């Protein structure tokens, strides 16, 4: 279904607490993606923006800001996609749909979020808007509290996940040390991540500060085109699969620990691509909280349910393991500018597969797995990318 679509260029700003406004970030990522692809801006047929917003900025008509990057973009169709923390992947799928419908040959997808200019309490409230609002008990929960419940339930049903979560946090911070685009390039040992201290307080017990992703500014972009047209480009990664699965919003209606939406998305992507998790050379996954990465190991089939810690204990998910997970540093250390996250995952995976990933390069990588999640495993996107031309 998606093997006729390829990525031929990428752009990526630094992630962190940035001085640029939303427009500046969009323009920077856009221009880099167009420059990297070697395209004339006039050859872009349509523009797509992933941007959650949820009241975090006043730029309500943000998709139009992409047109500021090049005069050739004037009069091109542009739209915004929103699907909570998976807004970037939603924009990618909208771009794919335009190509597959024959309405475009080449599209630009940008993901962006500006978050650090607002107080943490405001950001927490904005993100909580991605939860179910028609149940007072659920509406009262912040997302740290949602995933804290998951960690408590995991401990009750299986085993205490806190040591595994601390290892995940430490791993992702170590990976980010090699990624100059990451927000936090600072190593944390397992001991530092596992202890509750003044520097690592509990945010929503049992989640500690090091279990939580960062409040971040940033943007990323990719250029997608048809496989037929991709022969004209020097560095190409193709989609072997691209799957979107949505689950019900109320958490009371499902067993959160089973991660059924993500598991279904992974299985569909493996079926669509004719691969298994054992074929993958690396994975970029949605570690909004360390417990989410642990549950993702189980959803993708690395381990059985309740045994995600085995992927940490046997070294599988480390940088030198069989399936390195979040070589970029993940949301935990690279940062999580909500609307940009899904596009960032695809942009950096494209760079991995075309030998352009610099210090986080996995040598010889040919197949990459991406998982971007919106809300509490509600919007679930899984992609399998492969090298076409490196």
Image: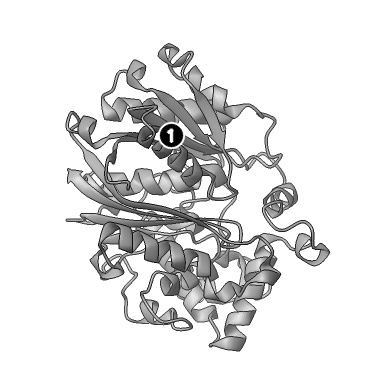
Q: Is residue 25 visible?
A: yes
- The residue pinned by badge 1 equals 109
The percent coordinates of residue 85 (x first, y second) are 56, 50
99 relative to 229 in the view: left or right: right
249 relative to 175 in the view: left or right: right
Secondary structure under tag 1 reads: strand
23 relative to 152 in the view: left or right: left
Q: How is the image coloured?
A: one colour
Q: Nearer the viewer, residue 163 or 81?
A: 81
Residue visible at 26% across and 67% down in the picture: 320
> Residue 55, located in which quarter of the rendered image?
top right
Q: Is residue 196 visible?
A: no
Q: Nearer the viewer, residue 57 or 360?
A: 57
The percent coordinates of residue 322 (x first, y second) are 25, 70
Q: Quadrant of the C terminus?
A: top left
> Residue 113, located in which quarter of the rendered image?
top right
Q: Nearer the viewer, residue 348 or 229?
A: 229
The percent coordinates of residue 326 (x first, y second) are 39, 59
Residue visible at 72% across and 46% down in the picture: 119
Direction front: furthest residue: 101
The percent coordinates of residue 311 (x first, y second) are 37, 77
Q: Is residue 297 above or below residue 70?
A: below
Residue visible at 59% across and 85% down in the picture: 155
Q: Is residue 118 above or below residue 247?
A: above
């Amino acid at each position: 279904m998606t093997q006729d679509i390829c990525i031929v260029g990428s752009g990526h700003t630094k992630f962190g607490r940035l001085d640029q406004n939303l427009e500046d970030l969009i323009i920077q990522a856009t221009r880099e993606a167009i420059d990297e692809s070697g395209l004339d801006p006039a050859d872009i047929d349509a523009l797509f923006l992933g941007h959650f917003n949820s009241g975090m900025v006043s730029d309500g008509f943000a998709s139009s800001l992409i047109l500021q990057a090049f005069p050739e973009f004037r009069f091109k169709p542009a739209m915004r996609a929103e699907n909570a923390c998976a807004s970037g992947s939603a924009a990618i799928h909208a771009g794919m749909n335009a190509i597959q419908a024959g309405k475009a040959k080449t599209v630009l997808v940008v993901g962006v979020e500006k978050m650090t200019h607002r107080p943490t309490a405001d950001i927490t409230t904005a993100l909580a808007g991605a939860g179910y609002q028609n149940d007072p008990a659920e509406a009262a929960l912040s997302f740290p509290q949602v995933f804290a419940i998951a960690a408590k339930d995991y401990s009750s049903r299986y085993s205490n996940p806190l040591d595994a979560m601390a290892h995940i946090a430490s791993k992702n911070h170590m990976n980010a040390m090699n990624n100059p685009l990451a927000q936090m390039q600072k190593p944390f040992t397992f001991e530092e991540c596992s202890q509750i201290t003044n520097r690592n307080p509990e945010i929503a017990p049992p989640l500690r500060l090091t279990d939580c992703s960062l409040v971040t500014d940033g943007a990323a972009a990719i250029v997608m085109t048809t496989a037929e047209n991709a022969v004209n480009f020097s560095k190409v990664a193709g989609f072997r699969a691209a799957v979107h699965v949505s689950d019900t919003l109320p958490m009371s209606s499902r067993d959160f620990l089973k991660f059924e939406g993500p598991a279904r998305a992974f299985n569909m992507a493996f079926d669509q691509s004719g691969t298994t998790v054992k074929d993958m050379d690396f994975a970029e996954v949605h570690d909004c909280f360390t417990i989410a990465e642990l549950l993702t190991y189980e959803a993708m089939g690395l381990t059985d349910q309740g045994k995600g810690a085995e992927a940490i204990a046997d070294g599988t998910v480390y940088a030198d393991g069989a399936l390195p997970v979040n070589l970029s540093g993940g949301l935990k250390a690279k940062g999580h500018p909500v609307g940009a996250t899904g596009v960032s995952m695809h942009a950096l995976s494209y760079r991995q597969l075309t030998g352009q990933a610099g210090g986080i390069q996995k040598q010889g990588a040919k197949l990459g797995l991406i998982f971007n999640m919106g809300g509490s495993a509600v919007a679930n996107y899984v992609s399998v990318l492969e090298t076409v031309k490196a």
